[in-house]
Image (spheres, rainbow, N blue to C red):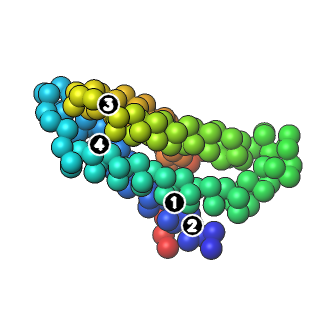
Amino acid sequence: MYQIGLWLHTGLRWLVLCSLVYTVGRALWGWRFRYSFTATDDRVRHITATIAHLQLMVGATLYFISPLIRFFFSQGKQAMAYREATFFGILHPLCMFTAIILITIGSALAKRRPTDPEKFRTILIWFGIALLLILLAIPWPWFSWVHRPLFRNF
């Protein structure tokens, strides 16, 4: 179960990143060139937020069944000295949960903005900040202090 969850979480990472990059890019172009906010733009906003929430659910499930997190909570101070336990016990979930909150707020605010440029600008700001936060909190393979593979084998 845990390995399937890790595989799913890693795969969904790419969906979250691609959808966020696409949504932020679309919002940037829409805001910059004063395009109309179409039903497609609204659908992209909604689908991106839904994918992010799905990733949150998979991540939360993994958090509570992870042996590393169990070690983190059972050993306390000893676990804090272990970089991976600290990263996955505190930093990663805190940053990712914050990013999902930003996406949720941005999505809700964009829906309620009266003009098209305001909708695009709202998405650009809130989703853009969330994207940066997510990029910083992913354990990329090139990070020296904590790293995971880009793709997991099933």
Label 1 sits on a secondary structure element that is: helix
- In which quadrant will I find the N terminus? bottom right
Query: Which amino acid, mark 2?
Result: Gly
Count neighbours of disc 4 (C-alpha within 10 A) and say few if under 14, some if 14 to 19, many if 20 or more: many
Query: Which amino acid, mark 4?
Result: Thr
Asked whether residue 145 appears in the rendered view, the answer is no
> Spatial distance from mark 3 to mark 1, Cα to Cα?
33 Å
Q: Earlier in the sequence, mark 1 or mark 4?
A: 1
In the picture of the structure, the residue carrying the numbered disc 1 is 9
Q: Is residue 58 above or below residue 79?
A: below
Label 2 sits on a secondary structure element that is: helix
> Spatial distance from mark 2 to mark 4, Cα to Cα?
26 Å
Q: Is residue 48 above or below residue 61?
A: above
Left or right: residue 154 compared with residue 78: left
Query: Which amino acid, mark 1?
Result: His
The reply to whether the C-beta atoms of the residues labelled 1 and 2 are less than 8 Å apart is yes
Residue plotted at (55% across, 37% down): 98
| Residue 113: assigned label | 3
Left or right: residue 74 compared with residue 63: right
Closer to us: 59 or 148: 59
Rendering quarter of residue 12: bottom left
In the picture of the structure, the residue carrying the numbered disc 4 is 23
Left or right: residue 75 compared with residue 58: right
